[in-house]
Image (cartoon, rainbow, N blue to C red):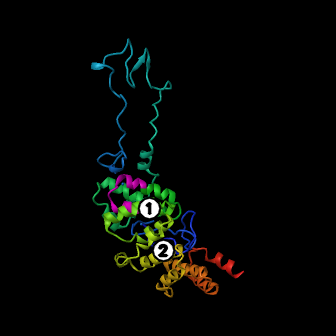
Amino acid sequence: MAQDRNPRNGGNNRGGKPSNKPGNTRGKPTSSSRNSGKPTSRDGKPTSRDGKPTSGSRSGGGQRSGPGGQRSGPGQRSGPGQRSGPGSRSGAPRSGGRPSAPERTAEQKIYDGPPIPDDVSAKDLDKHARQELSGLPDKLADKVARHLVMAGTLLHTDPETAHKHALAARARAMRVGLVREATGETAYALGNWAEALAEFRAARRMTGRHIYAPMMADAERALGRPEKALEYDNPTTRAHLDEPGNTELSIVIAGARRDLGHLDAALHILETEPLHTTNRSDWVTRLRYAYADTLLATGNTQDAITWFHRTAGTDTHHTTDVHDRLKQLEN
C-alpha cells in the first residue's frame, strides 16, 4: 500500500496507538500493497456469486398460512403484507409510506464498508496491484480496488477508517493475497497485533512474499514474545528483503535484543547497518533514532546526543520526537 516500511524501532517503550515515531512508539506499517494512497464466503459474510450481499431468506414473505394458502379467517390472511382485518394490511404504515428497510447486520456493515468518494477510481491502484485482482469478476474487482485505494490513502491519517475499508475488501476477496496484506497493514497501524500477524501469515502463504517480516517480528515484540521476533532474523528472510527492508528488520531485532536485556548485542546489530549513508529516506531516520536511543540506554549520553542530532538532520517530515529528546538531554 504505502511505499516505505515502518515498524517501530529498537526502542524499549511500548503501548499507545502506532505512530511513525520509532523508539517509543510503533511506526506506520507498509509493505508491497500498491495503491495511491502493505475478502468472501468462507468467513461467513453473506455474498452472492458476484460478490454482492444477499438479503437472506424472508420470514414467511409471500407464503400463505396452511396448505394451499388457505385463509385463516374471514377477510384476513396470515403472512406479511396480507390482510389482518377489514380494511387494513399487516405491517403497512398508517401514513401510507413504505416500511423502512431492516437494519444491516454487523457482518453486512463490514461488507458495505465506509462510503467511497465518487472520484476514487480503481485505476488509482497501482497497475501491478490491479493485476492481482484480475481473477475477480470485473465489477467485484473494481469495488475491491476502490476500497484498497481508500485504505492506502487513509492509512496514516485515519487508520481506523482505513482498516474498515480493508475489511470491506477482505469480505469480498478473502483469497487474494494483496487484500490480506492490506488488512494486515491497517490492523498493524491500529495496534491490533494478533490480527495483523494472522493476516500477514495468510498473505505470505498466498503470495510467497517475505516483505512483511519486519512488521510480523515487531508484532511479536508487541505481544511480549521477543524470542519469536528473533526467529525472523534468518538467511532466507534476509535474502528476500531489499536494503530498507533489511534495515527495518534489524531495527526490530535490535529492539527484541533490548527487550531481553542484551544491550550490547542490540548496539552491534545497528552498527552493521548503513548509519552513515547519504540517503535521506525515512528508514534512515528510524535507524539513526534507534541507534541513538540504544546508545542512551547503555549510558553513552554524549554519543547519543550526537546521533540524535544526526537523526534530526534527516527527519524533515517530523516522523520522530527527536527534537523533544534533544531538549530533554541538553537542558
Q: Which residues are magenta?
A: 167-183
Please count the marks in the image: 2
Residue at x 68%, y 80% (from the top left corner): 329
CA separation in Å, label 1 and label 2: 16 Å
The answer, for residue 150, to whether it is visible in the render is no
State which tag comes first along the sequence, 1 or 2.
1
Q: Secondary structure at mark 1?
A: helix
Query: What predominant SS class does the magenta segment belong to?
Result: helix
Rendered image quadrant of residue 320:
bottom right
Percent across and percent down for residue 170 are: 38, 55
Task: Give the left or right position of residue 219, taking residue 134 as reference.
Answer: right
Quarter of the image where the N terminus is located = bottom left
Percent across and percent down for residue 200 are: 39, 64
Residue designated by label 2: 252
Q: Secondary structure at mark 2?
A: helix
For the residue marked with disc 1, what is the amino acid?
Answer: Ala
Rendered image quadrant of residue 86:
top left
For the residue marked with disc 2, what is the amino acid?
Answer: Val
Residue designated by label 1: 196
Residue 31 sits above or below residue 151 on the image: below
Label 2, residues with CA under 10 Å away: few <14, some 14-19, many ≥20: many
